[in-house]
Image (tube, rainbow, N blue to C red):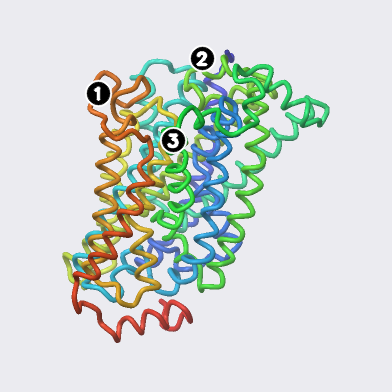
Amino acid sequence: MIAANPVLNISIFGVFVLITLFVVYRASSMGTTSDYYAAGGGFNGAQNGIALSGDFLSAASFLGIAGAIAVYGYDGFLYSIGFLVGWLVNLLLVAELTRNTGRFTMGDVLSFRMRQRPVRAASAVSTIVISLAYMIAQMAGAGGLVALLLDVHSSGGQAVVITVVGFVMVAYVLVGGMKGTTWVQIIKAAMLMLCVLLITLFLLGKFGFSLTSLLQQAAEKNPLGERIFDPGAQYGENAMTKLDFVSLSLALVLGVAGLPHVLMRFYTVPDARQARRSVVWATCTMALFYICTLVIGYGAGAISGTEAILAAPGGQNSAAPLLAYRVGGTVLLGVIAAVAFATILAVVAGLTLTASASFAHDVYANILRGGRADPDSEVRVARVTAVVIGAAAIGGGIMVNGQNIAFLVALAFAFAASANLSTLLFSLFWRRFNTRGTLWGIYGGLGSCLLLVIFSPVVSGSPDSIAPGVDFAWFPLSNPGIVSIPVSFLCGYVGTLLGGGQVSRRRSAEMEVRSITGIGAG
């Protein structure tokens, strides 16, 4: 166990919050909806790429993956591979076309040549559900981190801190909008990268810069022994766990391109070229990060031991903080505390902004007000929505506190791939795709994914379920992506065939030209 210094940890975290709130306040510019939603398109590719990595490298990446590698070895690293490979889909198929076609939200792209009201409503529902699923995972990470770093072991105490984190997150969004939130994510990404690089160097130094020695000790301190270097330690027990792994992989690789907060970031750059550069910068940054997490994960197992990690408050999520304490004492642990909290705050702030923007822009401005809402009222609605979304995320985080956050984020990826990927690709590449296909694709994918999660071991039927005392699970897989993603594509295809002549040839041609050339992009 570690001798946490709550005063030091809170002090470092408090300094970070004060500095970033000041940056948010100074950077904030919310005179128009473009300022609030997309920072006026004023960031270049390098800045936006680093912000993208800050938005994407969540508590799951920093805490959950390191813990999964420490406990399961190779199988834990598969999360990293899935998260990273998914960016190729963004680079090749989504980033440039989305930037050229839309303006603020995913609903702008999907409704470009469809009936506005039903498609924007479906897009808003999808965005809010996915954002909430992702935010709840981050809040769960906050609870586990607090238990370890601030020596708060009671569930009530952790709930209080999750609430505080939620309030700070909402403050970022209300004060700074997209511009302020982006600078927080850039600062957080720089801190996170510096932190993991230093820990990696310190860790390798303890083993004489011999990776072989580090891996050998990791195997010695793990009950699985040298199995941690081979596939199958977590997902190789039987045919069902292997199928679960395939489902997880599909969700991780295909989910990135459907994440609303990632898609929204492409509007913060001035043109499609900078959108492509953003993805390249983000991919390179994250590749370096995930290489470091591989060393950190095995290093945590080598120094702390698997049993100590699992016995610590927060379980697997405590691997990186435990390692920081063993390597650098209470000071490095305090820095890790600040970086981990910064990670959670930056990610949930971006998600809150995305969900509130979708409701204000798609539902309020374009459905309820028919596209005639004034900018001030739209921004005001977005701010109120941010408060409501934040409160819902706080409640959900308290409910799932203690779950592995990498696993919870994988569920959010399954929702994103199921609800959004098929409709985005069909909208951008299939001229016959119509309104009915869009609605069937979104609701079919989202509904099937939600139904399968509710009746899976995630919710009930196993000791680590959200509700372990009951059992109504009939779907055997923990991640439903292998079923719900094909269902979404099939629903979109069948809905299009049954939709008749709902396609505007003029708008289809306009969308095709605009998506490729950028002519007319706002």
- Could you say which is closer to the camera, residue 337 or residue 413? 413
Residue at the location (28% across, 39% down)? 391
- Could you say which is closer to the camera, residue 211 or residue 130? 211
| Left or right of 325, for residue 445 | left
Q: Could you tell me residue 466's position as x and y percent?
A: 32, 27
Q: Say which label, 1 or 3, has the lower sequence index.
A: 3
Q: What is the spatial separation of the Cα atoms under label 1 and label 3, in whole angstroms?
A: 20 Å
Judging by the rendered image, the residue that carries numbered circle 3 is 407
Judging by the rendered image, the residue that carries numbered circle 2 is 311
Q: Residues at badges 1 and 3 in contact (C-beta under 8 Å)?
A: no
Q: Secondary structure at mark 2?
A: helix
| Left or right of 265, for residue 274 | right
Q: Secondary structure at mark 3?
A: helix
Judging by the rendered image, the residue that carries numbered circle 1 is 471
Q: Could you tell me residue 336's position as x and y percent?
A: 59, 31
Q: Looking at the rendering, in which quadrant would you find the C terminus?
A: bottom left
Name the mark nearer the viewer: 2 or 3: 3
| Left or right of 206, for residue 500 | left
